Amino acid sequence: MTQKNRLAGGQLDRDTTLSFTFDGKNYSGHLGDTLASALLANNVRLMGRSFKYHRPRGPLTAGSEEPNAIVELRSGARQEPNTRATTAELFDGLSAKSQNRWPSLAFDAMAINDRFSNFLTAGFYYKTFMWPAAFWEKLYEPIIRKAAGLGSLSMQADPDEYDKGFRHCDLLIIGAGPAGLNAALTAGRTGAHVILADEDFRMGGRLNAETLAISDMAGADWAAQTVAELASLPNVRLMARTTVIGAFDHGIYGAVERISDHLAKAPRGKPRQILWRIYAKQTLLCAGATERPIAFDNNDRPGIMLAASLRAYANRWAATPAQRVAIFTNNDDGHRTAQDLHAKGVKIAGVIDTRPDAPRALDYEVLQGAHVTDTKGRLGLTFVEVACADGSTRTIECGALGVSGGWNPNVHLTCHQRGRPTWDDDLAAFVPGGTLPPGMVVAGAAQGIFSTHGALKSGADAARKALGLKGRAPAVPDAKDSPVIQTPFWYVEGCSRAWLDQQNDVTVKDVKLSHQEGFRSVEHLKRYTTLGMATDQGKTSNMGGLAIMAELAGKPIPEVGTTIFRPPYTPTAIGTLAGRMRGKEFHPTRLTPSHYWAEERGAVFVEVGNWLRAQWFPLPGETHWRQSVDREVTATRASVGVCDCTTLGKIDVQGTDAATFLNKVYCNGFAKLAVGKTRYGLMLREDGVAMDDGTAARLAEDQFVVTTTTANAAKVYQHMEFVRQCLMPDADVQLISTTEAWAQYAVAGPNSRRLLQRIVDPDHDISNEGFPFMACGNITVCGGLRARLFRISFSGELAFEIAVPARYGDALMRKLMAEGEEYDVTPYGTEALGVMRIEKGHAAGNELNGTTTALNLGMGRMVSKAKDSIGSKLSERPGLNEAKALMQIGLRPVRADDKVTAGGHLMNATGPVDAAHDQGYVTSAAFSPTLGCMIGLGFLKDGGNRTGETLRLVSPVTDLTVEVEVVSAHFVDPEGERVRA
Amino acid sequence: MIINHPLLGPRDSAEFVYLGAAELMNRPDPETASAEDWHGYAYLRDNPAGVHRELWFHEGGDRSILIVTRDTTTHEISAVELARKPRAQT
């Protein structure tokens, strides 16, 4: 294909020709093109369909503010919807598709909406789909969902990688136009650490789009020379293709760097994008300005675009949408487009200027005091209708129209901490105002300083100010310094539709309707008409809507106010925000010391917080988890079983006040606990509700090892640090978490001592006399390896917990298995652990559920009255101590085959089944292989006095009603003889 | 946010866990406090639009608890101190 609309010059690599497809057709462009510039060069103006009316649309702009030219890039899993053709860099083999059309871009069936536009005005959905209410979910919503939205998702996982990174600097400069470049040069030459970020792939901003000169060279050449000098400075980091998306607290900025979006394929090991967190001591915003359009009837045809964008396409990309072009402007800037295009050989059909005193030109006709009133051309502009100053009308033939209504400073980032822009009457635009993010200074066009000289000077001045530089300022490069005057002109009164927000199909009429219907605040206007929403966030349309609103209200614009901006500045992919935290990488996976051994044994694992724990160990022939779990329980109770309990939190408490400290955090007493002894401890919250339980082992006069539940390990540690630092600042006590330092295994069952005697070194006596129930101590195993032994039991059997430094954990487990062969040692997982603790009636997370007190748990008398501890005072509140308070009980089904389910509620044997007659609830349930039926733990009103009573266990959600008997929670060995054996 | 740790210098707030208002340090004296005192301590907090003294736990760092004075409307931090003052060298 020939590039019919390719002009001379431009900043393209003409030696590199790239081929690409758009809607399946082949085209060619050059390195340096965007998708939009290459399509325009190939005489393609139509690039998309509008959101609501499916109107044919082409690019309005040449940058990230683009509302119309939104396409799908790439294919397969890499398909990316809603991408701006105006910023997508061309690469060889790029495939792009238009969106929101069927069956094709030129013929779109949904364009029928355009015919019914009288019905589809602002608030159409709110008004139409109101009733009957039942229709909403089944009928209206599916229809609207099908019709709405632009691009489509591939529905496949994103195959690309995304990363996150951190950078620090003295000065962050956002935007590399004349202000940003000169600021970077000024700051960089002082040796300060500077980051210069620009969303474009070529730094220079408008200098690349203009023919203006700086220091006797073309602006684009000055930009390239400046960038080269900056690149040579080791203290300056240039970040092209990087959009600063948000200004956060304390000088922290979010920035998205596109690493490989401009390549056919990401280089191996490179992410697609990086989300940078930039810590800047000072920030200079040089984000430039965005041109604003003028609204007139049918101002949305492909070929109608902002005048300065037309100029950018011609100067930077050597492309024009048509060979015959007209300009509609209210300011001098529009004339520059005519001059530049004329110089490139494009025919200027006329410059229509709203000002009666508009400057005349030699090379083309200027229509002073004239307005464009309408346009023609179904899939692209063919004619514009002009109302002349003398009342006559003219029809001008042209394939493109450049529109200029003046410029708006890009104040977005100044608003990210709720700074409100202020109105500048001279510019008829909002400029940065109010409270800027701390450390931010604004320069150049973003500050409303529109001349090139002004931009260069304000950039240098702001950099010097930010860095606190004194002395004489260096000379500013020579550049044009003509004053810029902007007189507001927002729209041409018409009888058809004049588009304000082309992305959301909002017209001047819609704004008027919104006002008429009472949606008059700026925020209401936005939500009622959708003005300023979607991917462009109204960068080209907000101002026009606001101006019309002000006119209708009869108020000046600043009194109507403005919406402010939130991050991100431009659309940011969710994948970029997620970075590497996807799927399994969303949180860390923690492996226990016996993990690889368990894997070899074919264990089934379960996630417990971040941990992976063995849930059960199936043997060949076992087809159901219950078979494995029942076997593990039975074998442990019959001989000996081993379970990895490393995940329990372990906190080392040391210091002369260690016992005093534990007396404060546990509701029961620890001061008198002898060295070499372990005690169960219950921790309360200050409001008297149980927080966590565990054991504390006194290894020395001034050292305890505290255990917590797996789930609460971090929380309990945090709580203990709070008590230590905030409530007992003078106590001599130190804490450290040693959860990861020790591998710890429960060895349980009547043969547990015999097994341990085979690995514990013989000089340590672990007989019942030498190491009785609840004993603890430092020992050695396997010929000198230091270890800790605790005689504690969660299963209700004779049991020990043995700990060795974590790196020996795998070896110890293998040793226990080898030495235990004689006793048929059985590894057991978390399920068997749970079954055994329910059989023994031990409370766990299900019972310590954040609503239960020591009293409810049957441990009311443990709360010591002899001392003050966290929660002891408030646990005495009458409301927590009612006569018929919930008490922990055990439950057995009356018919042995019946099911007991956790979550079910308890009702009296007769009487109504409702919340008013609720007697309690079931917290834990399991099949007990020891008892041969299901059993449960729960809380029952006055439960301590109702043993033997028959109740109904009901679960309305699963339609279950079962008769259960209230029994002791200690199903196994209620006298505790086994643990003391 | 950046919290200027008295011992470690400026640190990102992501390293910290927020523990609540600094009033949590003023636990009532169990010998003398009334029921109202305990109720206030356990349940009542001010919710100021402005200066707020609060506790931040440096969980991803040295495990100090810091008393941070922060303006809730601007996130400006005017003071940072250790909840537990280091003991004088003896």
Image: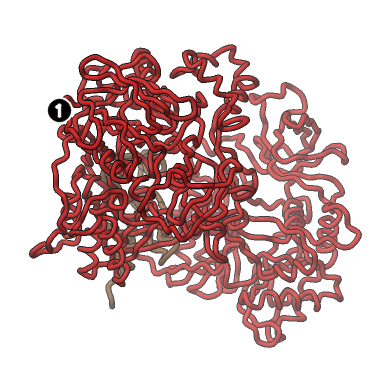
The subunit letter for the residue under badge 1 reads A
- The answer to which of A353 and A607 lies nearer the viewer is A353
Q: Is residue A338 above or below residue A977?
A: above
Q: Amino acid at mark 1?
A: Asp
Frontmost residue, A839 versus A103: A103
Give the residue pinned by disc 1: A357
Residue B87 spot, x, y in % from top left: 30, 70
Quarter of the image for residue A144 reads top right
> Measuring 62% from the left and 25% from the top, which residue is drawn there?
A142
Say which chain is brown: B
Helix, strand or loop at label 1? It is loop
Image x and y of residue A523, in percent: 35, 27
Q: Is residue A667 visible?
A: no
Left or right: A678, with B86 as reference point: right
* Residue A520 located left or right of residue A21: left
Q: Which chain is red?
A: A
Examine the image and state in which quarter residue B33 appears. Answer: top left
Q: Is residue A747 visible?
A: yes
Residue beneath the point at 50% across and 65% down? A671
